[in-house]
Image (cartoon, grey):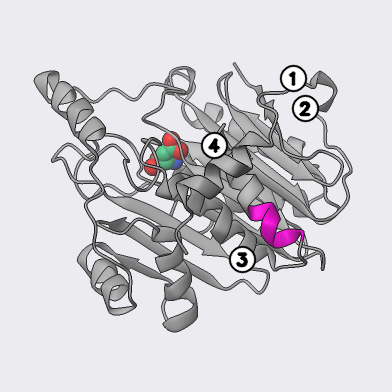
Amino acid sequence: MKTTRRRFLKAGALLTPFTFIPEIFGKTTAVNKPLIISTWNFGVPSNAAAWTVLSKGGRALDAVETGVQVPEGDPTETSVGLGGLPDRDGRVTLDACIMDEHANIGSVACLEHIVHPISVARKVMEKTPHVMLVGDGALQFALANGFKKENLLTPESEKTWKEWLKKAEYKPVANIENHDTIGMLAMDKSGNLSGACTTSGMAFKIHGRVGDSPIIGAGLFVDNEVGAATSTGVGEEVIRIVGSHLVVELMRQGNSPFAACKKAVERIVKNQPQKSKEMQVGFLAINKNGEHGAFALQKGFTYALYTEEVPNKLFEAKSYY
Ligand code: ASP
């Protein structure tokens, strides 16, 4: 299931890079089904991989798993999967979760040595009566299910970690490479929704730290009657407001995806008026009408959208600050 570098490059070559379409900022746009949306610049090649599933009439669940495997398998992406920056002990620990249209959920946290944690999360969802496995237990489960044990610490990430060790100061900075996650939401031709979220979490975190990304309701939430949401940024703040669930519930109350994401960000500002100025959190959402929206604390939160009308473009979300 691993996405090859070749396939990744082939997909990437067909795509336009960053496209600035101000009319779309801050608004929801009606689009045809199917639809894929995902966080940050690596959303573009990830959407391209996911589209290969949706365009053939495949399930949204298969699309999001295939899509997020792209940055997971890319050693040059230092915030997801292979090549992710390690914790402060030099260990690459991964968090991921997945949710489908039937409210089936699966999650892994603090998983080491496995390139595609999203696929382990899916196995947790499909092969166990549980919803979440962590640490060694998650690794044992992965190995028992045929996943290969690999070294995820690339020489480049090791070098960055050794540099960090010289001062060993942990200061999260908004919008830098060591602090991203891929969250992907999709609607398939049947109108069903699914989502996936995967990350190596905060770089140089305390060993055992788990962020929002593998927590259903925080990093990801899907309700097939209403819509779906995902998040990126400082996971502690997203968990504090159960962010993605909040966004979906706000949409249930009649808010557009954009308004729902904005209200969730405003809740974070209300909780942490000072701290929120220094950190990044972004939300991304879609609803059952095929509308999408995004909002972030800080400028610079990009997301990629793929529909029949908008074939894979990168946008920048509006922000509170
Ligand atoms: N949300 C992720 C975490 O807190 C990291 C990120 O998206 O930047 O682990």
Mark 2 and mark 1: Cα distance apart in space: 13 Å
- Report crowding for label 3: few under 14, some 14 to 19, many 20 or more residues within 10 A (C-alpha): some
Asked if the stretch drawn in magenta spans residue 54, the answer is yes
Residue mark closest to the camera, 4 vs 2:
4
Q: How far apart are marks 4 and 2 (CA)?
A: 21 Å
User: SS class of the residue under badge 1?
Assistant: loop
Q: Name the amino acid, label 2.
A: Gly
Label 2 element class: loop
**Gap between marks 3 and 2 measured at Cα:** 29 Å
Q: Is residue 60 visible?
A: yes
Disc 3 marks a residue whose amino acid type is Asp
> Which disc number belongs to residue 62?
3
What residue occupies the far left of the structure in this picture? 166
- Going by the numbered disc 1, the residue's amino acid type is Phe
Answer with mark 2 or mark 1, whichever residue precedes in sequence.
1
Q: From the image, state whether disc 3 or disc 2 is nearer to you.
A: 3
Q: Which numbered tag is attached to residue 64?
A: none
Q: What range of the chain is rendered magenta?
A: 50-55
Marks 4/1: CA distance?
Answer: 16 Å
Query: Could you tell me residue 290's position as x and y percent?
Result: 83, 50
The mark that comes first in sequence, 3 or 4, is 4
Label 3 secondary element:
helix
Q: Which quadrant of the frame does ligand 1 lie within?
A: top left
Which of pointers 1 and 3 lies earlier in the amino acid sequence?
A: 1
Q: What element carries label 4?
A: loop
Q: Mark 4 or mark 1: which comes first in sequence?
A: 1
Per the image, the residue denoted by label 2 is 26
Location of mark 4 (residue): 42
Label 3 to label 4, Cα distance in Å? 18 Å
